[in-house]
Every structure is written in C-alpha cells, then in structure tokens.
Image (cartoon, rainbow, N blue to C red):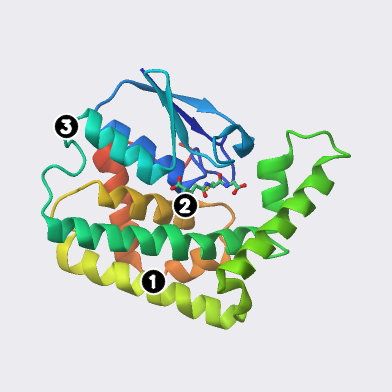
Amino acid sequence: MITLFTFPEAFGLRNVSPFCLKVEMAMSYLKLDFEIALESDPRKGPKDKLPFIISDGKTIDDSELIFEYLDEVTEGGLFGNLSDQEIAVGRAFNRLCDDHLYWIMVASRWLDDEWFDNVKRGFFSYLPPVIGPIVSKLAQGQVRKTYNLHGLGRHTQVQQEQFAIRDLEAINSVIKNNGYIVGERLTAFDFGVASLLSGIYDNQPATWLSTIAEQFPDLKDYAQRVQAGVNVYCKLS
Ligand SMILES: N[C@@H](CCC(=O)N[C@@H](CS)C(=O)NCC(=O)O)C(=O)O
C-alpha cells in the first residue's frame, strides 16, 4: 500500500494541487493500491512541499521523482512504451506546466487581492482566528517574493496574461493535432498537463486565469477526457 500526502480540498477542488493530482492520476492509471492522507502543512514533506509518498517504508517527494519511482517499481508502467521523441516532447510540455503556467495559476489565486480571501478560507481556516490572518498574509508575501524571483512577477498584469495565453496556445495546438500530449493516446505526460488545466478551469470562483482559459474549449474537453480516462477528478463531486 502506498500513501500519498496531499492537501485537503479547497476552492471547490478535491485535490487542489496539480502536483498532488498528477501523482494520484498516475497511481490510478497504474492500478496501484494506494490511500490518500490529507496534510495541510507542506513542511511535513521532506522538502517543505507536497506531494510526497510513503511506499515500502521509503519516503519519496516531488511529483517527477515519484513518477520515476513508480515507473521503476512497475517496470516501465509509465514510460516504458514511449519513444525517446515522445518522452522529449512530453517532458518539455510538463516543464512548461510545472515551471511556468503553474506559477501564473498561483499568482491568479494568491496575488489577486480580491481572490485572496478564497485562499485565506481555503488554506488557513484550520488555524485559530487570531493567527490565521497573520499567517496567511505572511504566506502571501512569500508567494509574491518567489513569483518575483522567478521573474514572472516583474511583468505587468497584461504581460502575465499574454504569457498565459501563449502557454495555453502551445498546449492547445498539440491537443488539436493529436488529442493528447504525445500522440493519440493517453500517456503519463497527460497527467501533469491535465491536472494543472483542471485546477485552472474548476477552481471556484473563477480566477482571471480561468477566464482566459475559457477561450480554449478544446483544452477544457481534453482536461475532462484525461480525468475520465483515469477516473480521478479535480473537482469536488
Ligand atoms: N516540483 C514539485 C513541486 C511541488 C509544489 O510546488 N507543491 C506546492 C503545492 S502545489 C507546495 O507544496 N507548496 C508549498 C510551499 O511551497 O510552501 C513537484 O513536482 O512535486
């Protein structure tokens, strides 16, 4: 039995973190025996982030490293049937999602002052009422700093929106051609992309990024198709 540590539900999402959701999707795809343990505090993870898993007494963190581990223990269950070219394309799109579009999604939730009330309710309501607002404000400051260090946070709002549109256009263009990220079948590389997209489409209320993503109906269908393919959904039913 593998235990997957993920955040509790928030913003109308049963799995609010795309990194946690993609691991859940992979384990379901591989038909592994696993359970989910809810954890509000990412500092419980080996590198202060979720997800991490405990498998056979070993703790493994980072969704990409978890995928490598799962591929190994299932003897190629995730990547074994993919060509080098497919792996290259899949990896590039996963990087686009993990290291670029993900941060724009984070900004659309945390750094939009109007939307931030949802973050306070979703992530910090477990804290006592005097502590919650202070901790949430400190955490917001940390997110602002990280976004700035990344570089995206130095751009104007309009420029950030244009970056997001170009990311979504890139994904849209492969999906329109192939149906999936690499070729015409569901692969492990769809989980990272669809988990992020489903978080963008389904978080409640809509963020400015959700509104932009609505211009790409094929992407919305794709995110739905991948979730249905593994029977793992982002949205609370
Ligand atoms: N590279 C990591 C990223 C994980 C990650 O950024 N997790 C976020 C939630 S979506 C987190 O735990 N953030 C808490 C923090 O940075 O304090 C992975 O692929 O698992």
From the top left corner, tell me how far across and down residue 8 is, in percent: 57, 34
The mark nearer the N terminus, 3 or 2, is 3
Q: Which mark is residue 27?
A: none
Q: Which residue is mark 1?
A: 167
Question: Closer to the observer: label 3 or label 2?
Answer: 3
Q: Residues within 10 Å of mark 1 (few under 14, many from 20)?
A: some
Q: Which residue is mark 2?
A: 199
The residue tagged with tag 2: helix, strand or loop?
helix
Q: Are marks 3 and 2 in contact (CB under 8 Å)?
A: no
Residue type, mark 2 in image: Gly
Residue type, mark 3 in image: Glu
Quadrant of residue 168 within the rendered picture = bottom left
Q: Residues within 10 Å of mark 2 (few under 14, many from 20)?
A: many
Q: Residue at x 28, y 56 (%)?
A: 222
Spatial separation of the CA atoms under disc 1 and disc 3: 33 Å
The image quadrant where one finds the N terminus is top left
Quadrant of residue 86 within the rendered picture = bottom left
Residue type, mark 1 in image: Asp
Q: Residue at x 36, y 38 (%)?
A: 66
Q: Is mark 1 within 8 Å of ligand 1?
A: no
Question: Closer to the observer: label 1 or label 3?
Answer: 3
The image quadrant where one finds the C terminus is top left
Q: Residue at x 71, y 44 (%)?
A: 121
User: Is 151 left or right of 167, judged from the image as shown?
Assistant: right
Q: Is mark 3 within 8 Å of ligand 1?
A: no
Q: Which residue is mark 3?
A: 75
The mark nearer the N terminus, 1 or 2, is 1
The residue tagged with tag 3: helix, strand or loop?
loop
The residue tagged with tag 1: helix, strand or loop?
helix
Please give the count of numbered marks on the rendered protein.
Answer: 3
Q: Residue at x 28, y 58 (%)?
A: 91
